[in-house]
């Protein structure tokens, strides 16, 4: 058995911490009837639950990619074990061939040959200019390349069938849980099971063939250095999730605290906080972020001794990006909360508490915070997709994540040159675009469902 | 009348979609309105009055559905008309006035544009002709200087003027039927009197039919010729004005009358209607009032009663055939405090001025004199009513005495302790002695806390001795709520129950003084009676003194020992209740009292009409604040503010006429 050294990156820590917090908040919600009722409304929403299912798939990919380790290098027995400088994740282990089976350069999706002609030496024939065979894509076919289409179709059908079987098992289980197919189909369940199952069906029918083919072909092609695009997409998911989640963690305390304090105390405190966020808002966000990222880049580059591996360096840069995005994006929520608090503080139950001499801190905690929580939740889910998109834009401009880290933004950035090339390499861009589109669309639909359920005016 | 009625509603049923179910808000009501007749729909909130009006105009909200019946207007069936033709009726042949003038005008359009819209659509007028017509309309509804008003925006108008503009818009299409949905509920009593007079005058002059929707028996007595009483989506009694006020037949109608607070009921408990209107989703099978009826019989619970003609033109829907459903209420043990002891609370020359800031540097350019030198005293165990129209500063007095708003000048002495400028510790002690009950029971309880936590808030904050859980249980019992209420959330309670919770919260710290800021104005009559009874009982048991802030004279008559009348930040008259109500000396008090609509046949006594509305406290008129509206103002009133004159040992008036 190969030894391994577990590596806990800072971002891993935050991701798992967030997950634990999420579970804890879930337990808390289950005990608060009002919140529970609101989340039940989310659960009834078909679009909300369908998008939640998609998000869950992305989340699982992201979580698998957040368990890191360094494999032991093979060495003579008795020697001190040496560990690879490459940090791998559980996802890398599961997607083994995707990571290791690199071609020489570009190849189109499901191709068996490279996308560029090369001069090859053929014994007995001489030098030839041709599209060389891929080392891994369709390698199992041997010389029988003509059978590629039939093979692809067969494997895709097999994958779809497997997916369908898996789905049937899931559907049967949920039907048993809610008490009968009829209720399920008619949507007579409290939870929108029918929407979830429908989404799962679509997912199974797409992912089944995808994975059935991924072992023997490059389903989304390869990039310039011959890396599988599907693998890059899978790795990008974690980056997007971290940007979306950790940033909110940074901005949330600041926005909530400052917004409520400004609205509750008014006077000079309000003036000061308003001044700060108005100034922050009037500086172009990209400039501010660029300046901060470049400064941080200098710090990282001048202290190489801080990092044992490249992954750790990239990880720190990612967190710093989250932090910077958080610092610049709290103003919107802060302004919303200030306005709501201004309204709440005039309500009679706040005055009743003041008439009892309850301290300001306690009034904020007991009376104001719980009554603005719906705004916080709505803002959180709505900001998520905006942040994922922001990362893509920043990486495209070159001030986003570390170049060694895969993200939707770096993929799109690389694709910039490919589109100008003749013939055009389109698959990287399209694959990154579709994956990000699905993630952001699901997040937006989910945010809409949450807003509808929590907005007191809509209820 | 021989000809066909103007509007005939027959077996109209309409409801609101809740999920898959249609919940009937109006369940088979029928009535008719003749030309020139005023028909009043009377009932408590949630009885389907407004839904009926919306159904007639086919203006139901998105979830609303008309399930059946017919609405015939001058011979044509409205429910069968296509939407395009319906638009010729809305605003043209039928017009509607809404409850809240502040929100029924578009704030970004001038008055002229909003009236012009109707003229153009329904009368085809434009340009100079339209303007001419607009000026006529504004004059008709009694707006002075209409040329200027026409080009003003709604925010430049006062509440009463906005309602006059709304009426002008409604009249612009020259309607044959006017639907007025609580047209004066949001207005002050003197302005209400003006608007009601205006409506009555216009209706008589134009021969319009009018459907008046109201919960106020006083308004009904003043305006209606025939009355329909609605309960839980059904009409239960239809009668002419005379029959309605002399011999109400339905137990619900009788209970409504009995629940009214009045001076003649001072020593007694008010009759209450137990329980509340059943929810739309859980309508009882038989008579819908059976669960709350004092005369309930077994048949009531099984079978919905049919219409019965009690007298010609007087129909009632009730199994019970008797005449007086209610026994005379028993007198409650109300210890009328006879000898005023040393005052518990004394306000001396209290002033609260809010600065008006303008310009970039936020310089103070003036003050809103919300409270401008108020002196009051309340003895232990007595009730002082602070009466006045909205904006006169009465709520500010209540909040300033509790130090919720910092007073600008003056002194507040509570049980010998000076509160103005007191430090936190001294204030803590005072907060235990004086507490407040707020107007809106829906805004005064934090929706995220359990009732137990809400009531225990003061106990924890002020460190009241004793086991909080036991105290909460005792308080809940005291205000007449079940003990398990402590574990529930505010949204599970009705308005009256919420107000009981608010009272329990205030009582939790055992105060000697309760400031009640319009505690019943958001409640229905029957629920108001429950709360007033409770307040009276608590006073008898605990000896609490009340500062009762209100604009409702019926409540004052029933409850108050002493009365102070406030106008524009100052007290114009104060004295014992019988003195102020029986022999009012200040012209403002006299006008206020005469403007209150009385729910009796003979209620239409001599009215003193006041012109205009109360001016802004930022720019009070020179001399006596009241002189621009006073029917008896003389030269001296314009020159200086009159001194207080003692008419008797307890009765003082700030008016030169009293001297």
Image (cartoon, coloured by chain):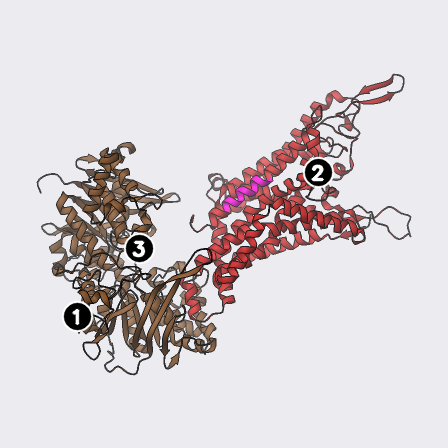
Chain colours: A red, B brown
Question: Is B41 within the magenta?
Answer: no
Question: Is A441 within the magenta?
Answer: yes
The part of the chain drawn in magenta is: A439-449
- x%, y% of residue B173? 22, 39
Crowd tier of the residue under label 2, counting other residues whose Cα lies within 10 Å: few below 14, some 14–19, many 20 or above: many
Quarter of the image where one finds residue B56: top left
User: In which chain is the residue bearing label 1?
Assistant: B
Crowd tier of the residue under label 3, counting other residues whose Cα lies within 10 Å: few below 14, some 14–19, many 20 or above: some
Quick one: SS at disc 1? helix
Earlier-in-chain disc, 3 versus 1: 3
Please name the residue shown 61% across and 34% down the image. A205
Regarding residue A237, the answer to whether it shows in the image is yes
Which residue lies most toward the top here?
A125
Quick one: SS at disc 2? helix
User: In which chain is the residue bearing label 3?
Assistant: B
Tell me the tag on residue B278. Answer: 3
- x%, y% of residue B231? 24, 53
User: In which chain is the residue bearing label 2?
Assistant: A
Q: Do labels 3 and 1 share a chain?
A: yes
Considering depth in this image, is A385 or A227 the residue closer to the camera? A385
Dominant secondary structure of the residues highlighted in magenta in the image: helix
The residue to which callout 2 is attached is A232
* Labels 3 and 1 touching (C-beta < 8 A): no
Please name the residue shown 44% across and 67% down the image. A353
Above or below residue B540? Residue A445 is above
Above or below residue B656? Residue A218 is above
Q: Would residue A141 appear left or right of B401 to someone viewing this image?
A: right
């Amino acid at each position: 058995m190969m030894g391994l050294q577990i590596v806990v990156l800072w971002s891993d820590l935050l991701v798992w911490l967030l997950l634990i917090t999420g579970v804890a908040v879930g337990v808390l919600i289950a005990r608060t009837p009002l919140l529970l009722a609101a989340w039940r409304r989310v659960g009834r929403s078909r679009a909300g639950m369908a998008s939640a299912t998609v998000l869950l798939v992305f989340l699982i990919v992201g979580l698998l990619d957040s368990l890191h380790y360094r494999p032991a290098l093979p060495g003579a027995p008795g020697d001190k074990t040496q560990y690879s400088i490459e940090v791998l994740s559980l996802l890398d282990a599961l997607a083994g061939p995707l990571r290791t089976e690199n071609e020489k350069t570009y190849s189109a999706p499901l191709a068996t040959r490279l996308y560029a002609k090369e001069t090859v030496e053929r014994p007995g024939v001489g030098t030839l200019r041709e599209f060389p065979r891929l080392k891994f894509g369709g390698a199992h076919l041997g010389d029988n390349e003509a059978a590629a289409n039939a093979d692809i179709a067969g494997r895709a059908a097999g994958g779809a069938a497997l997916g369908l079987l898996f789905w049937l098992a899931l559907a049967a289980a949920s039907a048993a849980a809610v008490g009968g197919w009829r209720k399920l189909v008619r949507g007579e369940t409290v939870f929108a099971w029918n929407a979830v199952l429908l989404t799962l069906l679509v997912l199974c029918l797409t992912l089944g063939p995808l994975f059935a083919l991924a072992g023997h072909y490059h389903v989304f092609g390869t990039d310039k250095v011959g890396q599988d695009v599907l693998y890059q997409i899978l790795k990008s998911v974690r980056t997007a999730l971290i940007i979306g989640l950790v940033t909110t963690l940074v901005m949330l305390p600041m926005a909530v605290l400052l917004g409520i304090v400004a609205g509750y105390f008014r006077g000079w405190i309000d003036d000061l906080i308003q001044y700060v966020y108005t100034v922050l808002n009037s500086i172009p966000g990209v400039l501010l972020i660029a300046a901060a990222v470049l400064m941080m880049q200098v710090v990282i580059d001048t202290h190489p001794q801080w990092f044992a591996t490249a992954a750790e360096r990239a990880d720190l840069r990612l967190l710093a990006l989250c932090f910077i995005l958080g610092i610049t994006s709290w103003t919107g929520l802060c302004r919303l909360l200030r306005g709501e608090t201004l309204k709440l503080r005039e309500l009679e139950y706040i005055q009743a508490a003041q008439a009892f001499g309850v301290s300001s801190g306690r009034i904020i905690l007991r009376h104001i915070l719980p009554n603005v929580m719906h705004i916080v939740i709505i803002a959180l889910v709505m900001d998520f997709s905006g942040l994922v998109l922001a990362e893509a834009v920043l990486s495209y401009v070159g001030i986003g994540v570390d170049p060694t880290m895969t993200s939707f933004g770096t993929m799109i950035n690389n694709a910039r040159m490919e589109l100008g090339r003749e013939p055009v390499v389109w698959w990287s861009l399209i694959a990154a675009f579709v994956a990000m589109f699905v993630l952001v669309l699901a997040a937006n639909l989910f945010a809409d469902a949450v807003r509808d359920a929590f907005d007191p005016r809509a209820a | 009348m021989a000809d066909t009625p103007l509007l005939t509603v027959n077996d109209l049923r309409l409801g609101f979609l809740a999920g898959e179910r249609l919940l009937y808000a109006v369940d088979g009501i029928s009535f008719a309105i003749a030309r020139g007749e005023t028909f009043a729909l009377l009932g408590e909130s949630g009885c389907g009055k407004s839904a009926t009006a919306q159904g007639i105009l086919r203006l139901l909200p998105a979830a609303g559905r008309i399930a059946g019946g017919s609405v015939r207007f001058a011979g044509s069936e409205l429910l069968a008309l296509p939407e395009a033709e319906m638009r010729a009726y809305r605003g043209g042949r039928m017009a509607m006035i809404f409850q809240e003038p502040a929100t029924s005008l578009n704030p970004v359009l001038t008055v002229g544009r909003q009236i012009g819209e109707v003229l153009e659509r329904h009368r085809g007028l434009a340009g100079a002709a339209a303007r001419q017509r607009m000026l006529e309309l504004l004059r008709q509804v009694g707006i002075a200087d209409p040329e200027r008003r026409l080009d003003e925006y709604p925010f430049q108008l006062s509440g009463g003027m906005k309602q006059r503009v709304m009426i002008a818009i409604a009249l612009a299409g020259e309607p044959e039927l006017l639907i007025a949905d609580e047209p004066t509920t949001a207005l002050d009593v003197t302005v209400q009197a003006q608007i009601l007079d205006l409506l009555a005058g216009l209706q008589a002059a134009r021969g319009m039919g009018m459907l008046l929707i109201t919960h106020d028996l006083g308004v009904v007595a003043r305006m209606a010729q025939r009355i329909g009483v609605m309960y839980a989506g059904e009409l239960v009694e239809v009668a002419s004005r005379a029959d309605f006020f002399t011999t109400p037949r339905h137990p619900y109608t009788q209970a409504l009358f009995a629940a009214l607070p009045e001076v003649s009921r001072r020593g007694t408990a008010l009759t209450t209607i137990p329980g509340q209107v059943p929810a739309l989703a859980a309508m009882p099978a038989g008579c819908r009032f059976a669960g709350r009826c004092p005369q309930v019989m077994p048949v009531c619970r099984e079978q919905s009663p049919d219409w019965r003609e009690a007298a010609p033109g007087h129909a009632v829907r009730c199994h019970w055939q008797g005449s007086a459903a209610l026994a005379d209420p028993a007198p409650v043990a109300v210890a009328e405090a006879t000898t005023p002891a040393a005052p518990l609370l004394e306000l001396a020359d209290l002033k609260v001025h809010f600065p008006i800031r303008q310009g970039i540097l936020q310089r103070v350019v003036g003050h809103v004199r919300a409270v401008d030198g108020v002196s009051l005293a309340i003895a232990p165990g007595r009730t002082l009513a602070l009466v006045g129209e909205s904006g006169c500063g009465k709520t500010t007095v209540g909040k300033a005495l509790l130090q919720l708003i910092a007073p600008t000048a003056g002194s507040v002495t509570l049980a010998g302790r000076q509160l103005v400028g007191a430090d936190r510790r001294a204030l803590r002690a005072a907060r235990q002695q004086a507490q407040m009950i707020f107007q809106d029971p829906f805004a005064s309880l934090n929706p995220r806390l359990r009732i137990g936590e809400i009531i225990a808030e003061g106990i924890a904050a002020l460190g009241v001795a004793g086991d909080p859980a036991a105290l909460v249980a005792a308080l809940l019992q005291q205000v007449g709520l079940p003990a398990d209420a402590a574990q529930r959330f505010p949204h599970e309670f009705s308005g009256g129950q919420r107000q009981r919770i608010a009272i329990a919260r205030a009582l939790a710290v055992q105060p000697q003084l309760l400031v009640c800021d319009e505690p019943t104005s958001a409640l229905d009559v029957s629920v108001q009676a429950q709360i007033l009874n409770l307040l009276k009982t608590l006073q008898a048991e605990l000896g609490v003194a009340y500062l009762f802030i209100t604009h409702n004279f019926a409540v004052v008559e029933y409850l108050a020992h002493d009365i102070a009348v406030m106008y524009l930040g100052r007290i114009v008259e104060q004295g014992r209740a019988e003195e102020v109500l029986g022999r009012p000396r200040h012209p403002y008090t006299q006008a206020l009292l005469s403007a209150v609509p009385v729910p009796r046949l003979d209620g239409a006594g001599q009215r003193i009409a006041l012109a205009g509305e109360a001016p802004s406290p930022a720019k009070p008129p020179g001399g006596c604040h009241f002189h621009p509206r006073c029917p008896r103002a003389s030269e001296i009133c314009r020159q200086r503010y009159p001194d207080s004159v003692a008419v008797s040992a307890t009765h003082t008036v700030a008016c030169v006429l009293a001297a």
